[in-house]
Image (tube, rainbow, N blue to C red):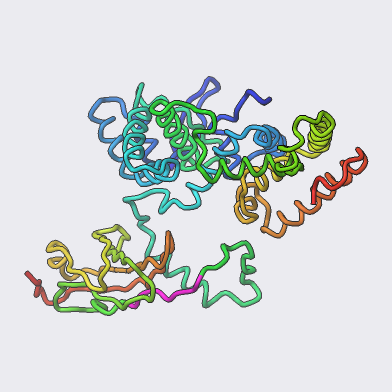
Amino acid sequence: MTCLCRDEQGAIAVSYPRELEHLLEARTDPAKDSAWSEFLVAFHRLLLHTARTVLRDEDDVRDAYAEMLERLRANDFARLRNFTDDGRTRFTTWLVVVARRLCVDSYRRRYGRTNGGDMSAGQKARHALQETQWSAVDPAVLASTAELPDVLLEERERHEALQRAMKGLDARDRMLLALRFKEDQTAIAIARLMGFPTPFHVYRRLTTVLGVLRESLGHAGVDGLLR
Amino acid sequence: MDGLNHPDPQQQARYLDHGCTPEERTIIEAHCAVCAECRAELIESHLVLRTAPSAVSGRRPVYIVPLAAAAVMTVFLLPRGHRPPIAVDREPGVVTAMGPVLAMPTGDVSALSTLTWTRVAGADAYQPTVFDSAGTVLWTVVTTDTSVAVPVTLRRANSRDYYWTVRARTGWDRWVTSSLTRFRIVGGAATP
């Protein structure tokens, strides 16, 4: 499906989904209503699925979905006009990202943005566990010796050494570690998200990166932090 | 893009579609490595896309029948050496299940009142769908039974080729689909 979108230099061919094309080209109110209906027929399942994935409660889903439609339609479909077909982005992918943001906005408007309030219980537990792991200090020992300055100092030094070692990694490796250990994503999910050919490539890269981190920490005199 | 400049939806979508340039990808990954919010956005959007029932609903491509035929022919005609390698990054633990077998109607029938197919072990829902020869969906429904009455409009549809298929839900977001089967109501004996 091709339409011509004119810019200052002249006409350039841009391809959009048929439904979006009709929507953006509609001039009269009846034409807009009709194009909007066509757009919804085509994409309502994707939008609803997005809301159901982001929000668990069915009432929240319904509210967010209604609000999402309202905001997509607002100001003569201003949000939808932001999509640019650069030949490297699918409209449905872009629509999911936008719809997800609208759902999160809707949720936050209703319940507010609390510290960690947007995280599921599982995410909170993982973050708590991760904090414990990275600190590499037994919480029981820490509780009984928290007053001792040398214990706190040692923990802080280890943490700083780890941060320095992490900064020496490539952005892609830092992202890989964050997805695996902070977000607890599976190798399959990471491979798909980051574009690794297979999960085995993820495992191999993780092994390599952790080896590099261990070596960096060893040079800094910190041992046993990463098992 | 530093810690305060989050990727816009276009950049996020491009990353999810693996359409970024290496430089752009590095910038986004450097940001997402430290920004939990953007990381969550990528993960959730990716999850939505991966589990989406269908990107575009309510519309079937008109070329579905020839495409299905071409796909079947390709399987049989393509030399073994040219077959693509089996993907190794599939989800683990997928149990192979045969799709339902369509019992009735098949081929030329004198009347149409119900669609009937075989049960699939472990399936808790079935979705029969009827298409016309252009691939347009004429009717679909979700049921727990292996037989369903068709609407009156379909019963009166005479002397044309129609196709139907049934998919069975065998687990959360897992479906197995039957083959596409043709039928035609001949003789004008429409069932009331």
Query: Which is more toward the observer, B96 or B105?
Result: B96
Q: In the figure, is residue A73 to the left or right of B27? A: left
Residue A77 falls within the magenta-colored stretch: no
Q: Position of residue A43 (x, y in %)?
A: 37, 43
Residue span colored magenta: B95-101
Q: Is residue A95 left or right of residue B60?
A: right
Is residue B100 covered in magenta?
Answer: yes
Q: Quadrant of the N terminus of chain A?
A: top left
Whether residue A142 sits left or right of residue A31 in the image: it is: right
Image location of residue A193, percent across then percent down: 61, 48
List the single residue furthest toward the front. A144
Q: Which SS does the magenta portion mostly show?
A: loop
- Looking at the image, residue A12 lies above or below residue A211: above
Q: Please report the residue visible at 28 percent of the width from the left and 30 percent of the height from the top.
A: A32
- What residue is at 35 percent from the left and 35 percent from the top? A22
Residue A131, percent from left and from top: 68, 39
Q: Measuring 25% from the left and 26% from the top, which residue is drawn there? A: A29
Find residue A176 and report its image quarter: top right
Judge by depth and name the residue closer to the eye, B190 or A95.
Answer: A95
